[in-house]
Amino acid sequence: MSFIDRMTADVDGRLVCAMQSTLSGLFLIGVLHATREWGDAIAVWSFGREPSWWARAPWAMVAALVACAVALLVGWRTRVVAVASSALLLALMTAVPSTYHNNYYLLSLMLLLLALAPHPAYRLGWFLGDAPARQTGLFPRMVQAQLAVVYLGSVLVKLSHPWWQGTGTVIRWAATVRVPPTHTLLNVAIGPLLAHPTVAAVADVVVTGVETALPLALLTPRWRRVGVCVGVVMHVFMHEWLFPQLFTMLMLWGYLSFSPAGARDLAVAPFAGERANRWLRAVDWYGRFEVTDRPDARRGLARVRALVLFTPLGLMSYALFALAFPSVTHVGPLARTALENAVVLAVGVLMVPEMWARGSRA
Amino acid sequence: MVRAAMAAPRPVWIMACLFALGQVVIPLARRDGARVPPFSGRFSWSMFAGPLTGRCAHELTLTAPDGRALPLRLPGGPVGRVLAARTPDEFVVIAPLLRSYADSDAELADALDDLLGRYHRGFVREPSVLRSALRCESPLGPPFRRTLRRVIR
């Protein structure tokens, strides 16, 4: 089978539809989250700028981005809207340079990939009806290639920049200067350790090594399961320490492309009521659940784990938890970041066994 | 493999070209001969790949043409916060509003000058002299100083 044939070979339609839904949801959450910091950047950029319609253009772009995210979510003119969204993001970053962030550049790339091969039958609520037909796997496979490009690009930076190159300078700076004002619990635990020059230098080498190995592991079927577990844990850890916003969510979304959709390989015990079972089937976007009374079927907490962890809905919940309502910085006396740390660390203990059980082979 | 690729439908080639173009469009757009290639301009999938900037002290004064000091009225909102930042701790917070991912304090100074021009032209308007002195000592970067004098007659 040629390379092109492998890239375009069909996959379960649920994989493509689930990735479309999740990317659209993350796009909407990400843009709404960004409006707060974009608002200040746009206000500074547009101050005293003439003509006045030009000063208002960035806000028109932001409004158009929200409309595009909604259109993608409902499946209206997906190809055209995805290209338009990508172009709008790039135009905004060009017009107002202080809105630039690699999060949104990655988002614009992922949207372009969506434009290449969306599912023709995608619509809002697609998961409530029959399983969508098989579809070319070009979109999820290109997303996997994009993940590899991101890691390799990051490694090139770490090898070429004097602040990395095994010196640990960036890590020490993050632990002592960048993170402390964000009041993360995680930095209270690991900050003093990473501030030590030797530990920081070792961490620098380890991160560079992991980022080199990840693309190789993810693109090799034998090592994919290890790659998915290590990569997801690394991104969640980085998010809880450094809060790189949408970047984490987009990378985790990329990992969802490795899911073996339609496999019916996770035995789950049915609920008592038929309505609950219909709900169970509706949230199983990837068609992984085999609803059965067999003794080995998941029950109780194991069933909840299967529903929530490392699934599109779980990822969107995480994105909402981390990114929605950015103006809320405290919940009562607790810093939001500290609260998020505590919840995610508690959930994280359950996450690794679940990811391992889910495996990957797309 | 090459033969299979040649026989592949045209959309696949268009997709491959778009993919490759997408990877380089921003790095090329942010390319600058004065910066260290290839991953300059803080374009990076790795956070904190550029120099730290924005640890600056900023002094802003407004005087009448005869040298008399005038009260410095600042607009509200983020523009006011940017112009009011004086100490390095204050300035580093507002620096991303001037130029996120700036490669040097000189880039920040250019963005600040642009804002000061718009402020003086559009907000002050009366005959006056606006003086701005910026001194930066960002970690691991060279010290940077610049003074600016803008006159409205």
Image: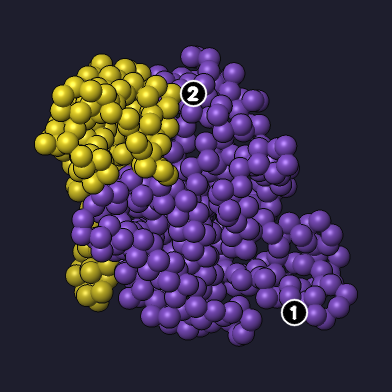
Q: Which quarter of the picture shows residue B151?
A: top left
Residue found at the far right of this picture = A272
Q: Between residues B118 and B109, which one lies in front from this camera angle?
A: B118
What is the quadrant of the N terminus of chain A in the image? Answer: bottom left
Q: Between residues A324 and B131, which one lies in front from this camera angle?
A: B131
Residue A151 visible:
no
Q: Secondary structure at mark 2?
A: helix
Residue found at the far top of this picture = A197
Provide the chain ID for the residue under circle 2: A
Give the residue at x 60% y 85%.
Answer: A130
Answer with left or right where residue B102 lies relative to residue A286: left
| Cα gap from disc 2 to disc 1, whole angstroms | 50 Å
Q: Nearer the viewer, mark 2 or mark 1?
A: 2
Above or below, B8 relative to A241: below
- Do labels 2 and 1 touch, CB within 8 Å? no
Provide the chain ID for the residue under circle 1: A
User: Chain A, which colour?
Assistant: purple
* Place of residue A251 in the rendered image (x, y in percent of width and height, measured from the top left): 48, 51
Answer with left or right where residue A82 lies relative to residue A309: left
Q: Secondary structure at mark 1?
A: helix
- Identify residue for label 1: A278
Above or below, A204 relative to B101: above
* Amino acid type shown at disc 2: Val
User: Chain B, which colour?
Assistant: yellow
* Place of residue A222 in the rendered image (x, y in percent of width and height, measured from the top left): 52, 50
* Amino acid type shown at disc 1: Arg
Give the residue at x 63% y 58%.
Answer: A317
- Identify residue for label 2: A177
* Place of residue B2 in the rendered image (x, y in percent of width and height, measured from the top left): 21, 64
Residue A322 visible:
yes
- How dense is the environment of label 2, judged by Cα within 10 Å: few (below 14), some, or many (20 and up)? few
> Looking at the rendered structure, which numbered label has been put on residue B109?
none
